[in-house]
Each structure stands twice: as structure tokens, then as C-alpha cells.
Image (cartoon, helix red, strand yellow):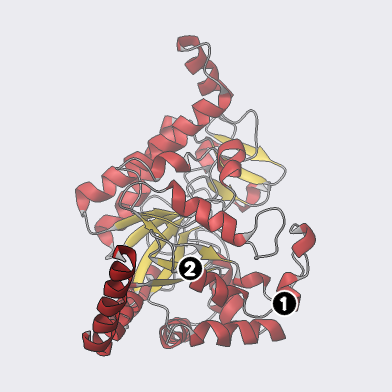
Amino acid sequence: MRKEYYLLLIIFLLVIVYIFVPKDTLKEENKSKLDEEKRAVFISYIELGNNIRGKSEVDMKKIIDSMLDTAKSYGFNMIILQVRSFSDAIYPSSIYPSSRSVVNTEGDDLPFDILKYFIKKAHQKDLELHAWINPYRISNTKDINLISTSNPSYDMLNTTDVEVMDNGIYYNPASSKVESLILDGIEEIITNYDVDGIHFDDYFYPNSLTIDSTEYNKAKEEDPLLTLQEFRLNIISSLVKKTYNLIKNYNKDILFGISPDGNIDNNYNSNYVDTRTFVTKKGYVDYIMPQVYYGFLNSVKPFEETIKSWNNLITIDIDLIPALAFYKTGNIDKFAKEGVNEWVEYNNIISREVMLSRELSNYSGFAIFRYDSIFGSNLTENAFIEKENLKNILS
């Protein structure tokens, strides 16, 4: 009888709640959560090159206005703009030359301050703007002739601070000179521009066994048991922590986030990014934006399992904002094994990923990689339908 009594009491209370709690209150709570949701889209150097390079100043500004209007009208509220992709800048810099993403030849005069214009127009439309930086990449080819004499890497060629490889030219992450260069570049941005955040993506340690051998050998003299992995993880963590402190000491309202590889093991074994530390200890990042570029049927890294693993890693007050692979819609996913045809056979993957992510305890929003994949002129049929399905859940 006692059990039956308590059961009836619970049912009675639930009925009372259902009857007397205003439905509008519940709707408002759900609406509030959606209003606070970060909805980001990446605008990379590829978009800049494809859309505005080579145009007149008037046309460039019209195109930027149109890109931001399109993002806003769709439902996005956050732009991640690539301001430094190759040791360069889309803004007047005393450190870096102008970027080939917006001028024809590195070091040419900028037509105007593109970052300043992006920020002004984004803020007019109530869009956040985060400045996206690649810390170590100098070039994605090994042709040193593409590097201008005004590039800080030019004087470092043929030194241990820079390495030329088959797949590009990179700064040595273990070089103290390089670390200072990166931090100076970030300081230049936050002190001169009203950015809402600074953003690093997944390009950290280049694929080289020798780029930091001088510094590693020196470190081993003090600690003979130090592994290369430990050394490199410490190097990246040092830069991340110093970047965070630099930003917060200037303005605590500027956010700092990282978009690491969605495969947690890859971060440790090839990129040397200690993501577990970043999401369990204060003083590294405000948000983590893992590139969870997988479908639900991916048999190597299925989306649901992967995003839940990221969510479960977080033990401090930081935001989880998964980056999603809109660029895969309508295309073969050749590394997904059994899920190779998922993005061809289904057209509601991205919207389902957002809906699932919204249920996670640390979720604060999502990001779409990248602008042209969702708003470009060469979308697949599946991409058009994916786009509409996503927009339906943003209303």
C-alpha cells in the first residue's frame, strides 16, 4: 500500500505541474537556450581568395556585406574569420606581410583594412567575430620564392627556427623566437581590433621528426627520460597557456578557443595537443571546438560516440562547440569504411548532429566548416536539402 500511495502522489504532482506551470514559461526557457546557442561558420582564406581577391575596394566591401548578411539571415551569430593563414595578415600589420588570400602577391598593399571592415559590419549585424590564426604554417608549398622579404620567416630560412618540407614551410614550435613572434602577433590584434575572440585550429606540430631536434636534445640533457611526445605536448601547452593569459590580461571578455582534431588520439600522437589538460584545468581555453567531421555510420569514429567522448572529458566551466563537416554533404567519405556512402545516401546528418549535441551537458553551440560549403554556388543536391534541414531547427 505504501508504494502505491507514493506512486499515486507522484502522478498527482506531475499532473499539477502539467496543469499549472505556464506552457509559455517552458517555451521561453527553450527559446532562451536557442538564443544563447553559438552558431558559427568558418570563413577561411579559401573563401577570401575565391570571393574578394582581385576585386575593387567597392566590390570587395559589397561581397563582405553580402556574406555577413547571408550568414545572419540563415541564423548564424558567430563568424570565425581566418586573418592569418600563412605567417601573413589581412590587416595592416607591423609584423606580418599582407596575405595572398586578399592580394595577388604577398606583401602587396592592402586595398583597405579588411579585418576592421569585417568587424564593423559583423557587429552592426549582431554577429560575433573571432580572429582565426594558424600559428606555425608559413606556406603549403616548399617554394621559398613565394615568401616576401617582409615576412618574419624570410630571415629565419636556413635556421633551426624554420623547416622546409615537401608539404610546406613551417615555423619550429619549440623555438622561443617563434613563440614570441606568435604572441606578439596576437597582441597586435587584440590591442588594435575589437575582436570577440582569438581562434586556433588543428594545425599545430608539422609532420617532422627533426624540426625541433636542437631544442629537444637540449631538454634531454636536463631530463634524459623525456620523450619527444612529452616535450612537444609541453611546447604546445605553453603557447596555449601564454596566449590565454595574454588575452585575459588585456581584456577578460575576449574569448580564446581551439578547434583540435576530432580524433582525440591524433591530438596526442601527431598534433601534440594536450586537449585533456585544456578541458580539465583552468587557464587554457574558454571553449573547445573539436572537428567532429564524422557521420553517424562512420565505423572508425562514429559521430555520437565521439562527441559524447569529448563532452565527458570536460570537467571545468568551458564551452563545447562541435565543428561539423558540411563540406562532406553529398560526397563519398572515403575514410569512414562502412559509412563511406552515408553523406550521399542521407541528407539530414548535420541537423541530427546538432540535435544530438544539444542534449550534452557542456554543449554551447556548433560551427559549420565552411562558408562556401553551405552558401557557395556549387552545392550538391544533398547539400541543398541538408541546408534546409539545418535551417528548420534554427528557427
SS label for mark 1: loop
Considering only vertical position in the picture, is 277 above or below 49?
above
For disc 1, the marked residue is 330
**Left or right: where does residue 20 sit relative to residue 223?**
left
**Front in this rendered view, residue 208 or 346:** 346
- How busy is the neighbourhood of tag 1: few (under 14 within 10 Å), some, or many (20 plus)? many
Callouts 1 and 2 close, C-beta under 8 Å: no
The image quarter containing residue 131 is bottom left
Query: Residue at 36% of width from left, 52% of height from top?
Result: 94
Q: Position of residue 178 (x, y in %)?
A: 44, 37
**Left or right: where does residue 265 sit relative to residue 118?**
right
> Cα distance, mark 1 to mark 2?
19 Å
Q: Position of residue 92 (x, y in %)?
A: 37, 62
Query: Residue at 30% of width from left, 50% of height from top?
Result: 187
Query: Residue at 52% of width from left, 36% of height from top?
Result: 156
Quadrant in the picture for the C terminus:
bottom left
Q: Position of residue 350 (x, y in %)?
A: 58, 74
What amino acid is at disc 2? Ala
Is residue 54 at all visible to an observer of this figure?
A: no
For disc 2, the marked residue is 367
Circle nearer the N terminus (1, 2): 1
